[in-house]
Amino acid sequence: MLKTVFKGVVTASVASLLAFSAHAADVIKLGAVAPKSGPLAGGATVTQWPNVELWSKQVNARGGLNVGGKKMMIEVIEYDDKTNPGEHIKAAQRLAEVDKVDFIVAPYGTGFNLAAAPIYAKYNYPHIAVSAISDKMPELTARYDNLFFTLGNTTSFTESVIDILDDMRAAGTIGNRVAMVNVADAFGIELAEAARPRLEEAGYDIVYDKSYPLGTPDLSPIIKGAKDSNPDAFIAWSYPPDTFGLTEQAIIQDLDVKMYYTAVATCFPAFGGKFGSKIDGVFGAGGVNQDSAKIQEYFKAHKEVTGKVADGWASANTYASLEILGQAIEGAGTIDRATVTQYIKDNSFDTIMGTISFDNQISNKYWTVGQWQGGKFRGVKSSQMDGAAPIVAKDGWK
Amino acid sequence: MDIIITGLLLGGTYALIAFGLNLQYGVAKIMNLANGEFLVIGALAAFWIFVADAISPIMTMLIVAPLAFFGNWVIYKVLLRPLVRRAKNQGQLEVDSILATFGMSFALVGIMVSIHGEYFTYSYLAEPFEIIGETFALNRIVAFCFAVLIGGVLWFWLYFTRPGMAMRAVSVSTEASGLVGINVPKMSALAFALGGAVTTMGGTLISTFITLDASVGVIFTMKALIIIIMGGVGDIRGAIIAALILGLIETTVARLIDPGLTLAAAYAIFVLVLLFRPQGLFGRKPS
């Protein structure tokens, strides 16, 4: 009796073992580490996580990825890095060593992509960074053979803002008076330092130039200070909470400028939701071609599958980076990471943002500035993107 | 003038942040590191209800306050009372309560992230309001009025009523107040629950003009801590004065010197108080 039971148990476990390995072979494990809590969680839950969900569900709905004639489903393994680089590295190590994932989704945030690059390089994961903007990209891609960049660099973001100023000055909409503020954090400081000499070179008067600490509870002194300097244009290299805070104060204090720019999170649906029509004409970092059929289809699917509205910038880039990964796996016909990495370098990819290819592991196809026009955040300046909308001057806060 | 009013408004905000922790730490002797999370819960409630049903945050505040009072009372009874009972001295209770509430703060952040991981941002009374020719945000003025109201009610209650006096006695000495017949456990639970309710109310008000997210609570805990240590632990007048001083200093520095130096100025004041009056502005010297 006992023997029979024992035999049964063995058979059952062998059977389940077999089933498990057969199952494992048909699954591509995709590891994702990004903030679900901590200061960057608010951004990651808009831009990063919904796209991981959307893409993996869509791929699985059509039967998985076709890898050398075999259909393989995507299984996503997610970890919260708590917006802490140390936690991120630990989780990345766990993905590689314990979960043994086949591929990874790039981290969220510039600092995290840079901090985690060595560990993903060590395990040969193709690392297609999206939410990472830096002028050090060529050095980094030279050092890490598996690292790709897709969202542009600091210089192009500041250049595009100055392009807009130039366009508006040439049209006689604004004069030379520019007020510039920045959040006292790596991102804000780097952009302000890049912009300052370029603005002076282009003959602008920087009439107000201040920084404020991250998490400043009252931004009204800054807007009042800027207003007192009587500027034609207002530029803020800002982070999400201050993008909201500065704009609220600008509306209340009626900061009357023809050009108003805030950086990160201007493209968020919550920004439009909070301010409604008042922010018509506001410029912000990023952009998207609202008229593209592919983008419209993507926005629709994003809303249907995740229940959330995609933002007007890096949402599409994030989704495109996953499309690139998927197409590279299918194209290479293997889940061997080195082969897939090489495939990404050698080929171009058909994404919702158009055809993307890499030059020295860097994609030069991205939006830099967008503008709220008629309730939509439209791309107005870009590097090699089609469909830029013409810029309009800000006409009060109504 | 503009600087003074802006500074007072900011001071009012800080007072809202600090009232609750002052009661919890001063009277109940619980160093509640999850204080900021309760503030964020108030903000989340205001945001959520406003976005879903367009109900004014002021209404939400009135709904949330009794719930928070009850929730904090339960937390005190279930989670913290055993710590109080087994602590041999004040120092041990502080360490234990810091650890317990630190853990609780993670749990609360997790719950809030699962409810709404994005920014809590909406527009309520974001309108200009003129005072002698200068423009201020109406929502900040409303919050300031409530800060005055809450502070006033607390002050009146603590200084002019019997239970208030009992509470102040507990704040001075738990042993002595027990000896004169004050029900110390009951008073401590009441102080903790009241503190939680006030903090949550502060959160609903603050959410009308500051964009919060689920993880931002710790920043408010730190600010509250600085204010109550500056003002003197357990003294509501001290918290109000310290909050106003911080608000005025930060605004003055931001307007006249550089917005980048606001934090530095706030901490400089804090260090000065610690150096020259370590018991806080209204604190008692340990006898």
Image (spheres, rainbow, N blue to C red):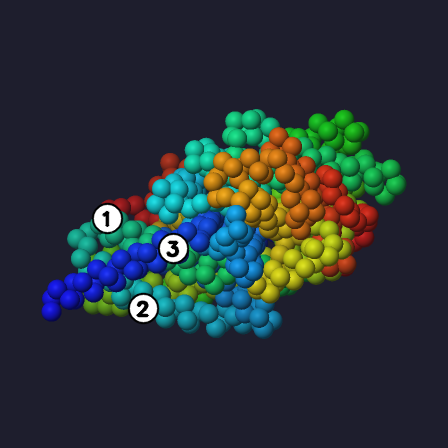
Give the percent coordinates (x, y) of residue B126: 65, 60
Q: Give the camera-side residue of A200 and B27.
A: A200
Give the percent coordinates (x, y) of residue A180: 69, 38
The chain under label 3 reads A
The Cα atoms of the two marked residues, 1 and 3, are separated by 59 Å
The Cα atoms of the two marked residues, 1 and 2, are separated by 24 Å
Q: Which residue is tagged 2?
A: B74
Q: Are marks 2 and 3 in contact (CB under 8 Å)?
A: no
The kind of residue tagged 2 is Val
Residue at the location (57% across, 38% down)?
A: A343
Q: Are marks 1 and 2 in contact (CB under 8 Å)?
A: no
Residue at the location (55% across, 35% down)?
A: A342
The kind of residue tagged 3 is Ala
Q: Which residue is tagged 1?
A: B91
Q: Which residue is tagged 3?
A: A22
For residue B34, say whether it is visible. Answer: no
Left or right of residue B33: residue A135: right
The Cα atoms of the two marked residues, 2 and 3, are separated by 51 Å
Q: Is residue A25 above or below residue A210?
A: below
Asked if marks 2 and 3 fall on the same chain, the answer is no
Quadrant of residue A364 within the rendered picture: top right
Q: Give the camera-side residue of B104 and A357.
A: A357
Of tags 1 and 2, which is closer to the observer? 2
Residue at the location (41% across, 39% down)?
A: A89
Q: Earlier in the sequence, mark 1 or mark 2?
A: 2
Quadrant containing the N terminus of chain A in the rendered view: bottom left
Label 3 residue SS: helix
